[in-house]
Every structure is written in C-alpha cells, then in structure tokens.
C-alpha cells in the first residue's frame, strides 16, 4: 500500500482524490500496489469540500507522519511550497507537484535535494499532456532543436475568438472570465507569465538551461488588435501566444510572446482552450502533442500518472532526466540577439513618401520587407502593415525607435514576431 497526503485540496486536489477512488482497481493493477489518500492539508477547515478523507490545516502533521510515503503538492505559490517540498524530500518522502511557479524558480535546488528520492512534476506543464515524460524519456535519444508550445489555454481561447469572430481583446477577455477560463485579475495568463514558467521547465529538460523568468523575453497578448488579425488573415497566418525554445549553435533562445504562424503548421490548428506542443528532434523530426492543458480531471490524471510511476519503480531517477550537462557550452541567448521575422504595424498620415521613408530606415538596419499591406483609416490616416525577412531583434527595435520619431507617425509602432 502507498499512502499519500495531498497539500492543497482545491479543484485538482479534489479530482485526484475522486479519481483514486473511482478508478481504484485499474490504478492498483497498473501501479502494482493500492494507492490510498489518507489526509488532505487545507488553509481553511471551515470551507466545505466534496472529499471523503480527513483534513488538517497543519502541514507538519503529514510531514512528520512516518506512515505517509508520498506528498502531492497542489497549493500554488513559490516560497512556502518550496519549504514544504524541501522538508518532505529531506524526510525521504516522495513528492509529486503540479506547481510550475515553484519549479520555474527552484527546480535545480529541488533536484539536488531529492537525489534518489522520487520527485515528479508532469502536471506542471500542459495539464494532461505527457510532455515531460516525452522529453525525458520518449525523445531522450535526440538533440532537441526546438520547442514551440501553446501552453496557456486562456490566451489561446482569447486569440481564437478574436480571429474567428473579429471580436476585440477586451470583449473576449470578459467572456473568458465569465466562462471561468480567465481569473478576475488575468495578468498572469494574458501577460505571458504562466507560459514562461512552463517553458523554463521544458527548457531545463531539453537543454539543461538554468534560467529564471526574469532572464527571458516575456510579452503578453494585451496589445493584439483587429488590424493585426486582418493582416494575419490576409497572408494566411494565425496569431498564437507561444513559448519558444530554439537552439542556435551554442545559444538557446527562450521567449514567450504572440507570434504570427503560418496556417499550414500543425500548431496553428490548435484552437480554443486546448494546448499543443511541437518538439523537433535531430533524429525523430517533428512530434506534436495535443490535449487539455488545464482543468481538474486532466491535471489530476497527470498527477496520478506520476504517483503510479513512483509506485512501480520505487527509486527516483534524475528529476530533469540527466546526470550530467547535456551539451557542453550551451548558454542562454540574450534577448536582443533573437533572430526571426517580424510584423510591424504603423499608423501613418496617408501621403506620398511614407513607405519610402520607412523602407529607407529599415534598410539602414539591414532589414528587408517581405510583405506589405495598407489599410486606409478615417481622416487621411492609414495602417501600414509590414512583414520583414529574418532580422535581429536589436536591429528591429532600434529601427522602430527611429521610425517613431518621423513626423507622419501617429502612434507608437507595434511589432509581432513571425515564426515561419
């Protein structure tokens, strides 16, 4: 018998308890032992919860209970769960977590503390999609060339509705909040921070890169406009918020931001609240992972899969999937050294010479124009929409700063990166 305690009995924790009960026999058959939730830890004992296990508000009760074999951490946050997980591992208790923020900041410290004590975290990225297992095991014979992931369902729902219905960001965000897809304060999701935490976990497994959220480029979807949607539709693009990890020689780009992506790519077809992750290996080529990225049952499914895995093997393997650095000399690329294509939106006075002036500045930074679209506006203004060939981030930023100073520019230029 494997006895477990669940710290944080919210939506996911309640689903874990329910699934362990509902699917008890098949889980026992697959795990080789009976898995029994014996206690839950909550902040507020007076709050009603639809679970049939004892509850406590004292985490030390389960940490100091030698009969409990495994701790499931589902409380969220960073520093408090770090101390709890650290204590559990030091006491020799196995740990399963779905806490991406915890791992974004403390994954390497926890790996060192865990040693051979099993520590699993499949549910921390993309809910029920087994992407952690795919990277650590299924693709372990490959150098990972790139990862592109739709790993935040809230943003994908909003962008899908904006593209399909022509709705504004503000209107769709309100709908997402009413449906429960977005929080009352949606900044963590729509600002790209949730996706960044998940990307850092994947990048550690794929490349051994130790980076924190503050070290990488993070942009959200708040500034996407119907004009950007028009450009995407005109040139057969979709707009997605992607977490991107890309190896370029000895540099690894890590970035989260909206992208224009051709509709011919598989990941462009992932719509609504669903998640999708494309991984390119040097031997296997592209593999694609699709499914529910959030929700109680989907996330609980991944948590229980980790518990079953621990029950089967007993001893832990390296948390991030390797014992030594994967490749010597890999380092994180600077934000300004990113290389990709760019979409640029300019609101301009509609007069002769505007395009020539813009093109001249871009050319001065070795940036060439690949596509162009002009959308007339009221009162003698136009939206000038451009797509460039591959350029360096710093060159594009400096060019836009210079363009902004031109007398016919009516508002701050906007830019979206293109992943072809």
Image (cartoon, helix red, strand yellow):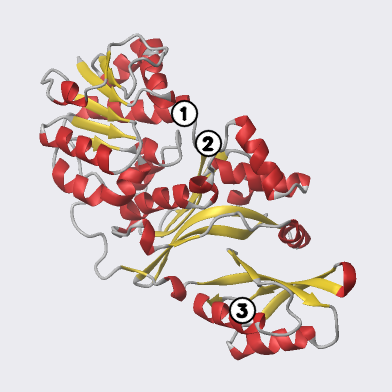
Q: Position of residue 284 (x, y in %)?
A: 43, 53
Q: Secondary structure at mark 2?
A: strand
Q: Nearer the viewer, residue 286 or 78?
A: 78
Q: Which residue is mark 1?
A: 298
Q: For the residues marked 3 and 2, what is the alpha-carbon distance in whole angstroms?
A: 38 Å
Residue occupying image coordinates x 36% and y 47%: 135
Horizontal relation, residue 295 to residue 419: left or right: left
* First in sequence: mark 3 vs mark 1: 1
Q: Which residue is mark 2?
A: 291
Percent across and percent down for residue 332 are 35, 67
- Judged by depth in the image, the label closer to the viewer, 2 or 1, is 1
In the displayed structure, 228 sits above or below 318; it is below
Q: Quick check: can you spot residue 381?
A: yes
- How many labels sit on residues? 3
* Disc 3: which residue: 400
Nearer mark to the viewer, of 3 and 1: 3
Which quadrant of the figure has residue 36? Answer: top left
Camera-side mark, 3 or 2: 3
Q: Nearer the viewer, residue 130 or 225?
A: 225
Q: Are marks 2 and 1 in contact (CB under 8 Å)?
A: yes
In the image, which disc is placed on residue 247? none
| Residue in the image at 21% along x and 36% along y | 85
| SS assignment at label 1 | helix
| Element marked by disc 3 | helix
């Amino acid at each position: 018998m494997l006895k477990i305690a669940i710290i944080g009995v919210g939506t996911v924790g309640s689903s874990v308890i329910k699934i362990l009960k509902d699917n008890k026999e098949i889980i026992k058959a697959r795990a080789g032992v009976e898995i029994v939730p014996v206690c839950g830890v909550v902040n507020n004992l007076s709050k009603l919860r639809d679970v049939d296990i004892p509850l406590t508000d004292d985490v030390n009760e389960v940490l100091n209970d030698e009969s409990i074999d495994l701790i499931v951490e589902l409380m969220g946050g960073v520093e408090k769960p770090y101390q709890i997980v650290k204590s559990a591992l030091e006491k020799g208790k196995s740990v399963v977590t779905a806490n991406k923020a915890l791992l974004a900041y403390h994954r390497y410290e926890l790996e060192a503390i865990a040693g051979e004590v099993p520590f699993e975290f499949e549910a921390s990225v993309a809910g029920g999609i087994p992407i952690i297992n795919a990277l650590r095991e299924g693709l372990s014979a490959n150098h990972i060339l790139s990862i592109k992931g739709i790993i935040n369902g809230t943003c994908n729902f909003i962008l899908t509705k904006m593209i399909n219905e022509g709705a504004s960001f503000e209107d769709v965000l309100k709908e997402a909040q009413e449906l429960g897809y977005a929080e009352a304060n949606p900044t963590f999701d729509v600002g790209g921070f949730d996706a960044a935490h998940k990307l850092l976990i994947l990048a550690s497994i794929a490349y051994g890169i130790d980076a924190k959220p503050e070290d990488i480029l993070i942009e959200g979807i708040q500034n996407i406009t119907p004009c950007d949607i028009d450009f995407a539709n005109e040139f057969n693009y979709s707009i997605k918020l992607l977490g991107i990890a890309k190896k370029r020689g000895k540099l690894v780009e890590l970035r989260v931001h909206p992208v224009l992506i051709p509709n011919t790519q598989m990941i462009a077809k992932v719509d609504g609240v669903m998640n999708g992750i494309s991984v390119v290996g040097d031997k296997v080529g592209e593999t694609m992972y699709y499914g529910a990225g959030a929700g109680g049952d989907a996330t609980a499914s991944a948590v229980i899969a980790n518990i079953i895995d621990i029950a089967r093997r007993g001893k832990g393997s390296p948390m991030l999937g390797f014992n030594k650095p994967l490749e010597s000399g890999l380092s994180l690329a600077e934000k300004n050294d990113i290389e990709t294509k760019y979409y640029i939106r300019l609101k301009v006075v509609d007069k002769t010479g505007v395009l020539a002036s813009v093109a001249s500045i871009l050319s001065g930074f070795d940036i060439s124009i690949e596509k162009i679209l002009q959308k007339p506006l009221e009162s003698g203004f136009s939206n000038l929409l451009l797509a460039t060939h591959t350029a360096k981030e710093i060159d594009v930023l400096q060019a836009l700063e210079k363009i902004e100073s031109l007398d016919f520019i009516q508002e701050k230029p906007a830019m979206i990166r293109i992943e072809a």
